[in-house]
Amino acid sequence: MTAAETRLPHALLFAGPMGVGKRELADLLAARLLCEAPRQPHEPACGNCPSCVMMASGQHPDYRLLQPDAAAEGEDEGESAAAGEAGDKKKASKQIRIQQVREVEAFFHVSGHRGGARVCVIDPAEAMNPITANSLLKILEEPSVSFYFIMISHRWRRLLPTLLSRSRRVMFAPPPDEQSQRWLAERQLADQAKWLPFFGHAPLAVAEAARTGRLKALESVVADLLKPQEALAQANRWENLVKADGALGMEELVSTVQKWLFDLGQCAVAASPRYFPQQNKTLSAISQRLSLPVLIQAQQQVFQLRAWSNHPLNARLFLEDLCVRAFRPLGL
Ligand SMILES: [Zn+2]
């Protein structure tokens, strides 16, 4: 281990919006810390040593990933209402369980398998409730020269102050759009760069949505919003969309409607749309039909619905409610 590495803090916090590469960098850093080949400080992991091979296969004995069970199963935020209605599927936890932290504690207290560094990545740190976070804190307070925690947080302001004070925060921000466009183009996703504003200019969020097939669903939601139809007919279309396989989660659907309402408000006061800048003309045309006070009211009402979007009792009724509230300013 080089001097530069031993100066790395025991606990790092990678903070910033989703989809800007925090986890990717954490994984690269973990591989680098565990790599057993001689490396210069600026060099990444070698990719060939036994340790790198184990990392690549996801089987490194000195590496732990702490994440909610739901993330491990590849579910995304706002699981579809269809699963909730079926009722027979036990839902995986969206929280990191106390038992998982205890396992890391045991891992911390035994010596490493390969005599080098050991790394634990926590993704995301806000998936720990106060009890879980406190038991992690106890481990963070113990000194260690070769144990590294890398916490990832999309909402770091929600973390316990004690957790923040015991870690070194590294802030991440979205790259400039030109850079993201190049990055997407290299992945055959040049056409999807138009989604960057929608995803807060986070290129990895766009790529992830493309990979999971959600972009297709979003594409059709946005097409609907640009040609709004009567509320109940709209609810019907969206019901099919959220019930389809690999579908859009209800929460993402509500947040898309929120973004659309926000942009309509922008156009109504002759400002530029934030999320759908390419649709400026269409949105401006729609905004001419609406009453601004009713639009503001609709924005507030849809905002309130969002809290329920993760577990609506009845997907169909929820969607009807959403469409009625959202389309009221248009008189639909
Ligand atoms: Zn290596």
Image: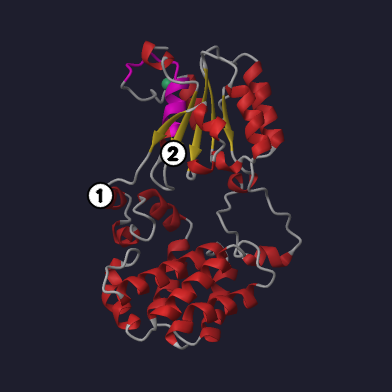
Q: Could you tell me how far apart the alpha carbons at marks 1 and 2 are, in whole angstroms?
A: 24 Å
User: Is residue 220 one of those drawn in magenta?
Assistant: no
Q: Residue at x 33, y 56 (%)?
A: 189
Give the SS element for disc 1: helix
Residue range corresponding to the magenta coloring: 26-41
User: Is residue 29 one of those drawn in magenta?
Assistant: yes
From the image, which quarter does the N terminus lie in? top left
Give the SS element for disc 2: strand
| Mark 2: C-beta under 8 Å from nearest atom of ligand 1 | no
The amino acid on which the numbered mark 2 sits, given as a three-letter code, is Ala
Residue 309 sits in quarter? bottom right
Q: Residue at x 55, y 11 (%)?
A: 115
Q: Residue at x 62, y 23 (%)?
A: 139
On the image, the x and y values in percent for residue 75 come to: 58, 53
In the rendered structure, which disc, 1 or 2, sits on the residue that comes first in sequence?
A: 2
Q: Residue furthest front?
A: 293
- Dot 2 crowding, Cα within 10 Å, few <14, some 14–19, many 20+: many
Quick check: 32 above or below 269? above
Q: Do tag 1 and tag 2 residues touch (Cβ < 8 Å)?
A: no
Residue 24 sits in quarter? top left
Quick check: 19 above or below 148? below
Ligand 1 resides in the quarter of the picture at top left
Q: Which residue was labeled with disc 2?
A: 15
Residue 39 sits in quarter? top left
Considering depth in this image, is 307 or 222 the residue closer to the camera?
A: 307
- Whether residue 244 is visible, yes or no, is no
Quick check: 81 above or below 317? above
Q: Which residue was labeled with disc 1?
A: 182
On the image, the x and y values in percent for residue 175 come to: 30, 45
The amino acid on which the numbered mark 1 sits, given as a three-letter code, is Arg
